[in-house]
Amino acid sequence: MTRVVRTRDGMLDIGGKPVPLVAGEVQFWRLNPDDWNPVLDTVVAAGVPIVSTYLSWRRHEPEPGRFGWGAASPSLGAARFVRACGERGLFVLLKPGPWICAEEPGGGYPDWLLARADDLALDAADRPVRGYNPPFVHPVPSVHAPGYFAAARAWLTAVWAELGSLVYPDGPIVAVQLDNEPGYAFQDALYAADYHPAAIAAFRAWLAARYPDAAAWRGAWGAAAAGDVAHAQPPRPAGAQRNDHAIRDWVAFTQESIVGHLARLWRVHEELGFGHLLPTVNLINHPVHDVPVPHVEMRRALPGAAVGGDQYYEPPISWADVHRLALTAATARAAGEPAVWAPELMSGIWRSPGEVASWPDPTLEEQAAWWGAALALGYQGFDLYMLADRENWALAPMGPQGTATSLLAQVRDLTSALSAEPDLVRSRLRTGVALLWDDEDAFAAYTVTGPARQPDVPWCSPRTALAYRETVRIATELISQGFTYDLWCPRRQAAPPNGLPVVASATSRWFDDHAPRGIVLVAPDVPVTPSLVGRRPPALVVPGTAGAGIATAGADAGGIATIHDGRRSLWLHVARWSSGPADLVFADSWPAGDWLPWLGSGEPLRRLACDRWRLPAKSPHLVFRWTPRITNNPADGEGL
């Protein structure tokens, strides 16, 4: 079926109509149905065009084959809720799982499914995998277990039997999310999953296809190749001596299993007649970035899907948090994503019974700064998670009855600014350097770094992970110094993007076989500064005091400034999460023209001296538009 909903040029294209890829999460099944209309009216008033919502499999199918859609429990009336969205002109991103997480018991898997021991994924010690985190730890089905996938297919079939008449163009549903944060409920580290007998059988079949010549397999696996491929065993942390080739094959198989699971789910949606919708994928921030589920591989397996990474922080915002925003956006650009977006962008904070939280609540200014930082670092769209408070969540922009909080005004201002000017949404981040990202460095770190939800580093080797961790340190310091960057993945890209100068860790494995010509090498523990990079960042937030030094200003200021190239204008984003006066320093003189306020305080920038400008009174997110002056002198305002 021809796809009529897609991402293009930074936006959502719905039947040829561009719509900002801006959504807000409203989990109707956790709200009083009497409050649905007031909540949706507030969504409309906030200018959010898309409502995203999960379906909790465990609530809709409490017993095998017995589905409930609101007759006995009105809060499960999914069709009624979707119709209410459509009546208000809102589009819907439907997220039926099968796994949804969502601070839901079992992550949304039915209790009866998780009670079927034969369908559960196993770890390297042949124990059932237990995913997510307290207080919602639960077993996880194996994606290779036939019983699991048969149940998942029946669930999706029931979903579309109930909601199929409400898809675009006859209804508001325009997109469907495939599973949720794929990777065995966060347990996708090397030895965490999946050793289910069906997974091992699939691994052996995978090896047979990869090594049609058994001698080649034995040559690669060496002592680990006991017997023939039909009896091959995946690597485990104890027992046989480590074999890097066997580990590499196991990781590749794990990747294909996770990516392949989503592809199989999408085929179910297509077979049921809904292939014209937009499939979406939300990736998590792994302990090792982009491993074992690379963004680019997800796009290859699901051409046309909108793939993005979920983005959260633990208050207060740190440069490590901002670094993850920047790295995930750069990864999406390197993968060729038509619209860089965050399928979940933190809005409010999770608050679950039994959870131990050592961080404070986020402030209003901090939340707005987080959204501003995302846009400043190249995100063109996002799904605010959550838009309305519900059980296990607090401090969202609206209450569960649709009452507006002070944060909702920030949402309204932001959506108004994005909707009023497509050039702002479609503009592209101006980057100053390319960061060398070697897949081999990340792979090596992955093989010695434990799962996110078990002990932090149960099998860590710092030396093996050094190159990766140095690259992460360099990326973090680049951002803190005002250097926006693109990734250069030399094993996949012939040359750095846009001819940018390259910055790299001197420890990278890439240099084992390649000479570092023309590359700025950063030795371990050497700070990244403009003098080391050999240039100044395009724009930098500095403390608003006399004599502030450029070299350390970014780290001291608690803010970032970036420039975006539009088709008709330049756009300047400033996101700030620290208090105190602040100025801007530009690397180069600008042609004649003015930076005019577009979002924020309404005050223009004021030149202090040379390329130093005074920012208006503190605002968490400011956007300025550069407009050339029109004169009779062609030397003035030569363009962008």
Image (cartoon, rainbow, N blue to C red):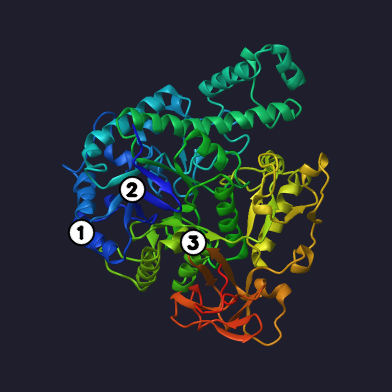
Please give the label number shown on residue 567.
Answer: 3
Q: Helix, strand or loop at disc 1?
A: helix
Quadrant the C terminus occupies? bottom right
Q: Is residue 141 visible?
A: no
- Which of discs 1 and 2 lies nearer the camera? The answer is 2
Residue at image location 70% in from the left, 17% down from the top: 217
- The residue nearer to you, when weighing 37 against 490, is 490
- According to the picture, the residue beneath numbered tag 1 turns out to be 37
Q: Is residue 545 visible?
A: yes
Name which residue type carries label 2.
Gly
- Which of discs 3 and 2 lies nearer the camera? The answer is 3
- The residue nearer to you, when weighing 30 against 607, is 607
Percent position of residue 123, x then y: 57, 32
- According to the picture, the residue beneath numbered tag 2 turns out to be 16
Percent position of residue 249, x then y: 65, 27
Query: What distance separates the C-alpha of mark 1 from that of mark 2?
Result: 29 Å
